[in-house]
Amino acid sequence: MLSFLHHSLLICYAITGMFKPLAAADAGNSLKHPLHLSATELNYNLKESTMEVSCRIFTDDFEDILSKKYKVKADLSLESKHKEMDQLVRKYIGAHLQLAANGKVLPLNYIGFEKDNEAVVVYLESAKVKNIVKLETTSTVLYDLFDDQTNIFHLTFKGNRHSFKLTYPDKRVASSL
């Protein structure tokens, strides 16, 4: 079964005409992926009245920006460095991903991150919010590393799924719900 990031990449390759077999991306870390992409799921939990967020970022790109920005040797795979990396991931995502509901910033609680094959998945959950009419997403994830970065979002709200993207230098998109 294709991972969510692989599925998103396959769609992007098909749309842009840059199709390259995905197996080549898995052949080793020495091969760089041709697109700079993150994929974020935004799921509104009706029972809890919270927005559940999971953001997938290529591990090598994420380690590169954490190393560059915080002047450390980032390694998101080593269990012995997980606590140290957890602080950096929290700090970076907090500065580069923001949600606003009905014009008010929606506080996001950082839950943690995990490594998933070629990607790192960062988990967040919003404060309780009811009666969302408009959701504004602001993202500059990896914009400080790549000037061709694309951040894809899949929003699920009350059973309806909407997808949108932000491509450098665009930072903000609003969705009416």
Image (cartoon, helix red, strand yellow):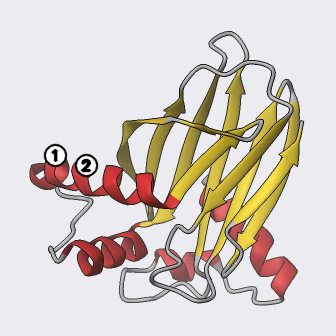
The vertical placement of 153 against 171, above or below, is above
Asked which secondary structure carries label 2, the reply is helix
**What residue lies at 81% left-to-right and 20% top-to-bottom?**
131
Name the side, left or right, on which 135 lies relative to 69. right
Pick the quarter of the image with the C terminus: top right
Question: Dot 2: within a 10 Å radius of its alpha carbon, few (fewer than 14), some, or many (20 or more) residues?
Answer: some
Q: Position of residue 69 (x, y in %)?
A: 28, 76
**What residue lies at 74% left-to-right and 41% top-to-bottom?**
103
Asked which secondary structure carries label 1, the reply is helix
**What residue lies at 66% left-to-right and 81% top-to-bottom?**
168
Name the side, left or right, on which 100 lies relative to 19. left
Question: Dot 1: within a 10 Å radius of its alpha carbon, few (fewer than 14), some, or many (20 or more) residues?
Answer: few
Name the side, left or right, on which 167 lies relative to 53. right
Q: Position of residue 156 (x, y in %)?
A: 78, 36
For residue 24, what is the image quadrant? bottom right
The vertical placement of 154 against 48, above or below, is below
Q: Position of residue 102 (x, y in %)?
A: 77, 36
Instruction: Between residue 46 and residue 20, name the one nearer to us.
Output: 46
For residue 85, what is the image quadrant? bottom left
For residue 101, what is the image quadrant? top right
| Residue type marked 2 | Asp
Q: CA distance from mark 2 to mark 1?
A: 5 Å
| Residue type marked 1 | Lys
Residue 86, which numbered label?
A: 2
Outermost residue toward the top in this view: 47
Name the side, left or right, on which 50 lies relative to 79. right
Instruction: Between residue 33 and residue 150, name the one nearer to us.
Output: 150
To which residue does mark 1 refer?
Answer: 83
Q: Position of residue 158 (x, y in %)?
A: 85, 24
Q: Are marks 2 and 1 in contact (CB under 8 Å)?
A: yes
